[in-house]
Image (cartoon, rainbow, N blue to C red):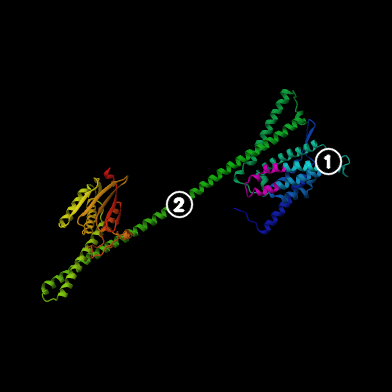
């Protein structure tokens, strides 16, 4: 979460930053007078440790506060104090210090928003080293010619280029070590609190890990040095520790730096590991919460589905009962109308005119058609209610039996039944399957009555999980663009004057096949016949 400050809080924070920047700068300026100097083999290096303080300011708060820290505290003038013999050429290390603060101040702020490699602290240090070397090579020899300055008559008036390069390299070594130390210090929670920087939960052990590693390094070095002095140099007093030689000082110095940097690497690794563990815990918690929400939503959805299914089943059941009741109740008045029309024709037939007699015949035909329709609706309704009585059947026997019945009812017709292949044994409700076959074959016979010969071809193909049956006839067919209407109740594609029927047969076929878990479809070509397909799932009783 981004922290937002009110204008008053922001002003107080800026004042705090200014005060801390100046205070650390002054502490750094005082520390200049206590810099560490090492001499060996005629080569000396000054370590002005205190310039670490303004660098910490710059890394934490940016260029503005870094410049405030080195200028208002006068620490920018430290080269004139430690290197007074350089005279006017001391301007070069002063400018280098400003450049050092600026480059790392910019990089420190950029790293808050991006992880691009060219803002990495050590890559920026490399860029700074290049600029520093150029500044020394170009400007140091030029400025030293203006010596001696008014404050030091003994300043150098000439320096060889090798010495200039040596000065530059010494500064590079010192400042590179300081950058590594600053990078490590900013990992420590108590340092981050001073600069009002947020610390991650993974940084809680950073100070203890760092202190333990440095203490271990110094203790180890102390033991090695003690052993060396007692066993090798035969020095049995602690004089070497009270007044250490230059070699001992350098050894402890390098050991401290080495273990401090190693501590920084270890601290960073430990912090990353703890942050990863914390992130995993948080992710696990969020995942668990998300799974609980999903389970809750699934339970709620399942309950809704069950409720809606129950409502739908109840509505369908009520509709079927209503349809059954209406269909059953319609038969009585229809039979009454048909009976009364018969009585009129039998008792008063001679007295009626031809037109009246014709009207009574039409009434009887309409009543008979309506009774047939009501019977079909009753069959359709009963079919929805009953369960399935699954058994193994031989489909060709049922198909042949139905075909023989149709053949007997149409003795004047020339009809042929052809089995394209051997039909497999299937597990179905025998009664309902026979009704499917009867509806399909009766349609084939009906819509091919204008042909000299009615030809019906039956075939079956078995796939991995279903049997697909096909019944092909040579009837009148139909246009496939209207095929979507065929499986609805009362849907017809031919006029009732041309072909009798009420439009329930195919709807019954679809309901029966779907009740078995199958599917049904139809293909046709006008005046070239129709093929009805249905697929029955392979039942476990078949295996």
- Please tell me whether residue 498 is drawn above or below residue 80 in the rendered image: below
Q: Position of residue 238 (x, y in %)?
A: 75, 28
Left/right of residue 280 with respect to residue 210 in the rendered view: left
Relative image position of residue 499 (x, y in whole percent) = 23, 62
Asked if residue 180 is among those painted magenta in the image, a careful observer would answer no
Q: Is residue 149 left or right of residue 205?
A: right
Q: Find residue 29 and name its label.
A: none
- Counting from the top left corner in percent of width and height, residue 256 is at 70, 35
Q: What element does badge 2 sit on? A: helix
Give x and y (percent) for residue 314. Answer: 32, 60
**Taking 139 as reference, is 383 above or below it?**
below
Circle 2 Cα neighbour tier, 10 Å, few/some/many (<14 / 14–19 / ≥20): few
Tell which of 482 and 490 is nearer to you.
482
**For residue 253, what is the image quadrant?**
top right
Look at the image and tell me in which quarter the C terminus lies. Answer: top left
The residue to which callout 2 is attached is: 294
Name which of mark 2 and mark 1 comes first in the sequence.
Answer: 1
Q: Circle 1 sits on which residue?
A: 86
Compared to residue 396, the image places residue 330 above or below, namely below
In the image: residue 215, left or right of residue 287: right
Q: Which residues are magenta?
A: 104-128
Confirm whether residue 57 shows in the render.
Answer: no
Q: Quadrant of residue 170?
A: top right
Q: Nearer the viewer, residue 181 or 362?
A: 362
Badge 1 marks a residue whose secondary structure is helix
- Asked whether residue 17 appears in the rendered view, the answer is yes
SS assignment for the magenta stretch, majority:
helix
């Amino acid at each position: 979460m981004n922290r937002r400050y009110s204008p008053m809080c922001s002003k107080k924070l800026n004042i705090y930053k200014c005060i801390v920047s100046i205070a650390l700068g002054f502490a750094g300026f005082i520390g200049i007078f206590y810099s560490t100097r090492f001499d060996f083999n005629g080569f000396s290096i000054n370590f002005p440790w205190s310039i670490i303080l303004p660098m910490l300011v710059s890394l934490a708060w940016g260029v503005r506060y870094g410049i405030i820290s080195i200028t208002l505290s006068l620490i920018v003038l430290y080269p004139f104090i430690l290197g007074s013999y350089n005279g006017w050429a001391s301007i070069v290390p002063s400018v280098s210090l400003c450049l050092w603060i600026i480059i790392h101040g910019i990089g420190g702020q950029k790293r808050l928003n991006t992880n691009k490699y060219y803002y990495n602290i050590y890559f920026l240090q490399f860029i700074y080293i290049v600029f520093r070397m150029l500044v020394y090579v170009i400007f140091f020899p030029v400025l030293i010619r203006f010596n001696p300055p008014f404050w030091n008559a003994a300043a150098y008036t000439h320096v060889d280029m090798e010495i200039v390069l040596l000065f530059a390299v010494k500064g590079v070594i010192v400042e590179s070590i300081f950058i590594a130390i600053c990078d490590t210090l900013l990992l420590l929670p108590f340092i981050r609190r001073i600069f009002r920087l947020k610390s991650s939960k993974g940084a809680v052990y950073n100070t203890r890990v760092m202190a333990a590693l440095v203490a271990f390094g110094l203790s180890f070095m102390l033991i090695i040095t003690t052993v060396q002095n007692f066993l090798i140099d035969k020095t049995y007093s602690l004089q070497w520790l009270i007044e250490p030689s230059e070699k001992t000082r350098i050894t402890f110095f390098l050991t401290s730096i080495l273990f401090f940097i190693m501590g920084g690497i270890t601290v960073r690794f430990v912090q990353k590991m703890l942050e990863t563990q914390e992130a995993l815990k948080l992710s696990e918690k969020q995942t668990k919460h998300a799974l609980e929400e999903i389970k809750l939503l699934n339970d709620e959805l399942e309950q809704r589905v069950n409720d809606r299914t129950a409502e739908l089943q109840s509505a369908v059941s009520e509709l079927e009962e209503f349809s059954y009741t209406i269909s059953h109740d319609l038969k009585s008045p229809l039979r009454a109308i048909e009976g009364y029309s018969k009585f009129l024709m039998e008792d008063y037939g001679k007295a009626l005119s031809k037109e009246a007699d014709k009207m009574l015949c039409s009434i009887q035909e309409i009543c008979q058609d309506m009774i047939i329709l009501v019977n079909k609706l009753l069959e359709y309704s009963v079919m929805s209610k009953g369960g399935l009585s699954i058994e193994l059947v031989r489909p060709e026997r049922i198909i042949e039996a139905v075909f023989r019945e149709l053949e007997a009812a149409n003795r004047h017709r020339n009809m042929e039944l052809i089995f394209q292949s051997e039909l497999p044994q299937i597990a179905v409700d025998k009664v309902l399957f026979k009704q499917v076959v009867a509806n399909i074959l009766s349609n084939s016979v009906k819509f091919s009555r204008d042909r000299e010969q009615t030809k019906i071809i039956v075939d079956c193909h078995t796939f991995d999980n279903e049997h697909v049956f096909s019944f092909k006839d040579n009837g009148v067919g139909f246009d496939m663009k209207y095929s979507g209407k065929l499986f609805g109740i009362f849907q017809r594609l031919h006029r009732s004057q041309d072909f009798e029927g009420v439009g329930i047969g195919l709807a019954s076929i679809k309901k029966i096949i779907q009740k078995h878990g199958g599917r049904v479809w139809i293909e046709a070509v006008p005046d070239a016949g129709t093929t009805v397909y249905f697929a029955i799932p392979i039942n476990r009783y078949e295996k």
